[in-house]
Image (tube, grey):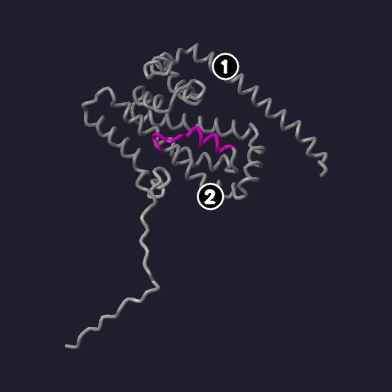
Amino acid sequence: MGIGMSEIGDSPSKVGRTLAAMALLGLFLVATRWLREQIGVEMSSESIQSAVRGLGYWAPLGFVGIVSIRQFLALPSVLVLGSAGLLFGAGYGALLGGIAMTLNAFLMFFIARYMGADWVRARLHERFPNFEDRARAAGPFLIALATGHPMGPQTAFHFGAGVTPISALVFGLVVLPAALFRAACYAFLGANILEPTSPKFWAASAALMLVSVAPLAHPGLRARLFGVKPAVVTVDAGTPRPREDTPNE
């Protein structure tokens, strides 16, 4: 079997693209590590609040920037989104948190798409011929669920979405409302966390818990998570039921 000249010519360019992307990612990691040391951000709500407040009028923009690269600063979403409520209040904190999480999602999406998405997609297509059709059909729903759920593994889904044929436009339309919803859940809790005896705190806690367990209401999801098959009611249509004659009056 021969190999076309075009394939030989394309291979170095693909390898070069991947190496360049890896080099850029390495430089990005070094830069964010330096940035973390400069602004003094640690994995605590107090550290985030102190760093953001120190930016003065630039605090909202600084917060969005920190959250946009949160994976490289080892900051979980629950921490940064809860801090948004403490810093800016429930409404404004939810808006800033949702925008920041959307930017972060696009960062993961484009990193995956640039770093050899075609190579990964080709190999997935070899093992799963219907991969692209399934990704287009179920992908947006799963991305929205992982992004909007308070405990959803959104980073993995955002990164994985970059490998699928889902367009950036569809990705953005799915992620933005889901990110705003997730940010609102934690910002509402964060805005009232300093008053643990207030009705708003208990309402925020109850809402967060309800949203977290709500997907378990779906029998298919319960079956996948716990291995419990949903109950199926079958009717035997092959055996005719005896006819009861109504007595004449």
Q: Which disc, if any, is residue 218?
A: none
Measured as percent of width and height from the top left, residue 86 is found at 34, 23
Q: Which residue is mark 2?
A: 137
Counting residues from the N terminus, which is met first, the one under dot 1 or under dot 2? 1
Query: Residue 57 occupies which quadrant of the picture?
Result: top left
Left or right of 166, for residue 62:
left
Q: Please tell me how many numbered marks the rendered image carries.
A: 2
**Percent position (x, y) of residue 61?**
46, 23
Farthest residue toward the left?
249
In the rendered image of this protein, does residue 47 appear above or below residue 230? above
Kind of residue at badge 1: Ala
- Going 39% across and 24% down the picture, which residue do you hit? 79
Amino acid beneath label 2: Ala
Report the residue that reaches farthest toward the bottom. 248
For the N terminus, the image quarter is top right
Q: Which residues are magenta?
A: 149-162
Residue 140 sits above or below residue 89 on the image: below
As rendered, which of 122 and 45 lies closer to the eye? 122
Q: Residue 219: x and y, percent?
A: 38, 50
Label 1 to label 2: alpha-carbon separation:
38 Å
Q: Nearer the viewer, residue 132 or 241?
A: 241
Residue matched to label 1: 31
Check residue 155 for magenta coloring: yes
Secondary structure of the residue carrying numbered label 2: helix
- Residue drawn at x 45%, y 19% is 58
Q: Nearer the viewer, mark 1 or mark 2?
A: 2
Seen in the picture, residue 44 relative to 151 is either above or below; the reply is above
The residue positioned 32% from the left and 76% from the top of the image is 241
Name the secondary structure under disc 1. Answer: helix
Residue 44 relative to residue 71: left or right? left
